[in-house]
Amino acid sequence: MQLNYIFHYLWINRFGTNVQFALTSLAAFQSGFSYVISDTQAMALRITERAFVHLQRSIMVDDDIRKNWIAAFDIGETKCEKLGALHLLSHGTWAFKAHGEKGRTDLILNEPLPDSSIIEKTSTALVLTEWKVVKNSNELDEKIKEAFEQTKLYVTGVLGGIELTNYRYLVMVSEKSTKMPSDFTEGTIVYRHINIPVNPKYPSVEARTKT
């Protein structure tokens, strides 16, 4: 009994400091890792939001871009997805749509996402989006619901920490600016409503129209 006590005492004195150091180091690593992931997510969100604002304003002021989007609007959702994904990629955001629980479909190529190493080397964010063309304002709610149900099929799988896990984008492409409902949260996921008007009025003109 006494020998066991002595052995335990010697083990603690010899290895206790090392064990404590290891535990402290592990806690510090965990804290640092969580901070890096959080910071990466915040950066991914800013880049994605900026890309959408840039797209909206580019359509407003650039005649060629506006013509391309008007043509895409007439063709349909697939063309709008491709144009939108290409613009987002120019900002470092790789957009995809859901294909089942784990399936990710490339919006430009309309096939499963390429090797993850390509995405990680070229992009800052990987974002789930669902694009819908809204021809008439009275179908907006139905299109949003349809987009929401399609994104719900997907179960997030983190890709190298760059996947924006807590935000999903329901993108409504319309001819004129359309008032979107408020964003909402389900569980830990925020669903963002984004409107891309392909032939918008300038804000000053729109304001005069409403008065």
Image (spheres, rainbow, N blue to C red):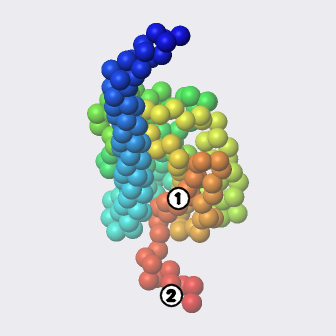
Is 83 on the left-hand or right-hand side of 179?
left
User: Residue 124 lies in what quarter of the image?
Assistant: top left
Residue lying at 61% horizontally and 42% vertically, measured from the top left: 151
**Residue at 50% in and 63% down:** 197
Depth check, mark 1 against mark 2: the one in front is: 1
Residue type at the position of mark 2: Arg
Residue highlighted by disc 1: 194
Position in image of residue 209 (x %, y %): 54, 84
SS assignment at label 2:
helix
Residue where numbered disc 2 is placed: 208
Q: Is residue 149 left or right of residue 48?
A: right
Which of these two is toward me, 16 or 173? 16
Q: Position of residue 211 (x, y in %)?
A: 57, 90
When asked about the image quadrant of residue 155, the answer is top right
Q: Position of residue 80 (x, y in %)?
A: 48, 48
Which is nearer the eye, 24 or 85? 24
Q: Dot 2: few (<14), some (14–19), or many (≥20) neighbours within 10 Å?
A: few
From this viewpoint, is residue 120 visible?
A: yes
Give the left or right position of residue 56, taking residue 100 as reference.
Answer: left
What is the distance, in whole Å, between disc 1 and disc 2 at their CAs? 24 Å
